[in-house]
Amino acid sequence: MIAAHADWSLAPAKRWMAVAERAGGSWRAEAPRPVGDTAQLLPRLLSSGQPVALGLDLPLGVPRDWAAARPEPDFPSFLAGLAQDPGFFCVAATLDQVSPARPFYPARGIKGMTRAAHAAALGLAGAASLSRLCDRATALRPAGAPVFWTLGANQSGKAAIAAWRDWIAPALAAGAPIALWPFAGPLHGLLASGRITLAEVYPAEALRQLGLKLSGSKRVQAPRRAMAEALRAAMARLRVTPSPALAAAIADGFGADAAGEDRLDCVLGLLALIAVLDGAQPDHIPDDPWIRRWEGWVLGQTEMPRQVISG
């Protein structure tokens, strides 16, 4: 089996992926590499003919209050249809450009803008309606940004646009052998030779699931280097052997350049994915039809948010 995790971004230079192959009861993990040409991503991962599980640090799902007005039965059907709707991905510069058919906002910072105003422009009841259940804060981690929001350091809207528009939607529309977790069912039931299963994995959630802590900002090399021993111990628990290049990257804190945090994130995501594949972390999907059809979930997350959505 092949496991991989890609740390995604609107900027190609910020897209990094870590890959591991399972043989018997253990894994060999390679050092992170640039994702490269997105048109070749799926063929490259599927070239061995083995089952592939690919974690992605980007939203796979949309909020239920927005989805309630959609005609499609579920998120995968909706996503496949976006291959014929490029206007959907145009980020609105002003609120009067926002609509359910053009939900991403804002193109740039504007004085006085709020998420409540964004929600109102989409016909939603309030700012909370912009978030999926898995985006909300839990007792163990802060909230993530809403899917359609594209401003700020923790926004994920731009990564969603880049991945949905440039390769996931066209691949689904073309009938590529892709399954989307959790919409198609539990992870282990989706793994098959010649198929790639996509799952949403958050590095911040992965860090918690792996029992790791950073002593400072992940954007700085020194805290990443200080975590090396704990990261190696987590890999040993999961029976993951690093290649010499990966071992060197871990010891070095993944480099001094700006992409160091991206290389760390894709390794954290890879280990969290392997933990679920090998049963060290549960393949938990809440029993909520909106989650299973439209919102999606974060792989390995078991905590429900502090504020639960009804309906």
Image (cartoon, helix red, strand yellow):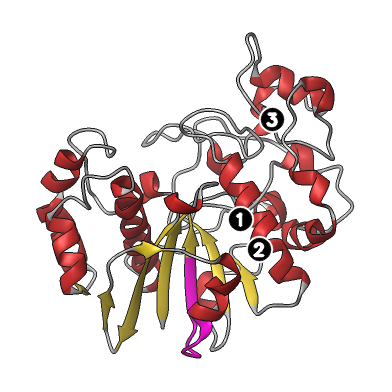
Give the camera-side residue of 285 and 201.
Answer: 201
Q: Residues within 10 Å of mark 3 (few under 14, many from 20)?
A: many
Q: If the image is split into quadrants, where does the C terminus sit?
A: top right
Q: If you read the primary sequence from the N terminus, does the residue marked by circle 1 or circle 2 appear first?
A: 1
- What label sits on residue 163 in the rendered view? 1
Task: Identify residue for label 3.
Answer: 105
Q: Is residue 183 above or below residue 127?
A: below
In the rendering, at what x and y percent does residue 201 appear? 46, 55
Q: Amino acid at mark 3?
A: Tyr
**Callout 1 touching callout 2 (CB < 8 Å):** yes
- What label sits on residue 106 in the rendered view? none
Q: Amino acid at mark 2?
A: Ile
Give the camera-side residue of 196 and 136.
Answer: 196
**Residue 281, visible in the rendered structure:** no
Q: Amino acid at mark 1?
A: Ala
Task: Name which residue lies at 63% across and 32% down.
Answer: 149
Q: Secondary structure at mark 3?
A: loop
User: Which residue is situated farthest in the top direction here?
Assistant: 112
Specify the segment rendered in magenta.
Answer: 45-54
Position of 212 with respect to 81 (left or right) is left
Task: Name which residue lies at 46% across and 31% down.
Answer: 153
Position of 198 with respect to 269 (left or right) is right
Q: Is residue 127 above or below residue 216?
A: above
Q: If you read the primary sequence from the N terminus, does the residue marked by circle 2 or circle 3 appear first?
A: 3
**Callout 3 touching callout 1 (CB < 8 Å):** no
The residues tagged by marks 2 and 3 sit, at their Cα atoms, a distance apart of 21 Å
